[in-house]
Amino acid sequence: MHTIPHWINGKAVAGTDTQAVFNPATGAEQAQVVLGGTNEIDTAVTAAAKAFETWSESSLTQRTQILFTFRQLLVEHEEELGRIISAEHGKTVDDARGEIVRGREVVEFACGLGDVLKGSFSDQVSRGIDVHNFRQPLGVVAGITPFNFPAMVPLWMHPIAIATGNTFILKPSERDPSAANFVADLYQKAGLPDGVFNVVHGGKPTVDAILTHPGIQAVSFVGSTPIAKYVHEQATAHGKRVQALGGAKNHAVVLPDADLEFAANHITAGAYGSAGERCMALSVAIAVGTAADGLVTVLERKAREVKVGPGDQPGTEMGPLVTKAAQERVDNAVGVAAQQGATVVVDGRGLKIDGHENGFFTGPSLLDHVTTQMQAYQEELFGPVLAIVRVDTLDQAIDVINANPYGNGTALFTASGEAARRFQRNVKVGMIGINVPVPVPMSYYSFGGWKDSLIGDSPIHGPEGIRFYTRPKVVTTRWPQTEQHTTAGFNFPTSS
């Protein structure tokens, strides 16, 4: 049994209060993580503020050289980090490696910020006067990240924050905290100065300390919608910038002209990959018209073919849920759906894996004839449950999506360009896939939904990330010749 410490100012920092970290595949406690609070956040802010004095004055070349090295270390240690994630989260090692790759893409984007951060210049806007602008870092910023992507989501935040000259404090999920410390070690190996990247573990007291600390200028958050609203309200009330990404209920619409084998194959992966514990997981399939019966038939076959097991076992496609409570919540949701009139086509409850009988496993569940009034449709289950909603037309499918309070991601499976164009223009959703089940944007686009999936107005990473972690300055300049004498006017200045 080992204890996972904080990482502050370039070194491990112990704590007195701890919480158990479990192996979801066995159900056994495997570590203790220290829990911080006001004192630890204050210590981290002090270190980060001191580091900001020099890091913010470092050259773009220095920053990008460190990030290039950090990116290479992520490549070299991908397997090791993937196994760390798998052991604490439960997802397969290959799935964990996939999230590392998608996070690394943001590091690559950050390596090119020398071009993106270029300002603009306007010559002779008035007689003898020029104007230019540039962007500067905010100071100490913080990220509060969820358990489902312990590497990728933080990597959507801190590389851009650090590349733009800020210093960063990460509060990862206490369910799978080791990835954050591993990344901190890679940053140190890459040459990042002490205090620029810090990790403070903990629960609500740590979060509240971040939201209220006067030394923190901005907070990035990804998690459930209720907590996103809380983070946004508290942090803005204390004068901070906030990115707050909330929950999701992502729909995949299948039209009669779609290739049902292709659609079902991708919907199955989108619904059950990572045991459905993704904010971009497909949890609802809307079958339009005559597509319904055939789609359900193929989805049933594919759900039964999913290989469930420990995440580090070769051939496993879906691992356990992250905690016993998550397993019980998902199993209960399937039972409630049956009571409310849904047809349980595939029942994943009660699954036992040989040699891992105490693991937090549940198999893929497929529910048909689900209505929008049912709990299985209305709640974000965050588990391997796919609900089938049947409608007659594409317009009805769009109406169902638009009536849902979430607007994170959606997908349409069709062979019709006209239908695809109508769909992508009319759905009130931030990220859309056309024959793509999990439309997570590349790093040079920004990630963010609509409605209750994004509280406030600031998406994450990409161009929006640069704007979030910097503020602009506009400089108006005159260099009069010494023999010139200009008269200062008392009227508001105009160009001439």
Image: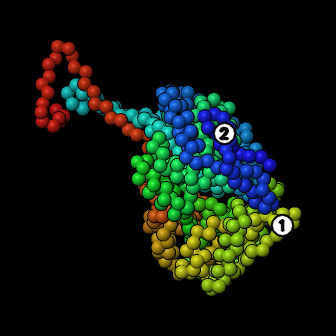
Task: Give the residue at mark 1.
Answer: 357
Is 93 situated above or below 321?
above
Q: How far across and how far down the image is residue 444, in percent?
A: 52, 45
Task: Give the residue at mark 2.
Answer: 13
Which label belongs to residue 134?
Answer: none
Is 72 situated above or below 4?
above
Residue 323 vs residue 117, the one in the foreground: 323
Q: Is residue 423 visible?
A: no
In the current view of this chain or complex, which residue is farthest to the right?
355
Side of 23 where 116 appears, left or right: left
What amino acid type is highlighted by mark number 2? Val
Is 138 situated above or below 230?
above
The crowding category of the residue bearing disc 1, from other C-alpha atoms within 10 Å (few below 14, some 14 to 19, many at least 20), is few
Which image quadrant is residue 276 in?
A: bottom right
Query: Residue at horizontal 48%, vertical 43%?
Result: 216
What amino acid type is highlighted by mark number 1? Glu
Query: Residue at horizontal 57%, vertical 80%?
Result: 374
Regarding mark 1 in the picture, which secondary structure is present there?
A: loop
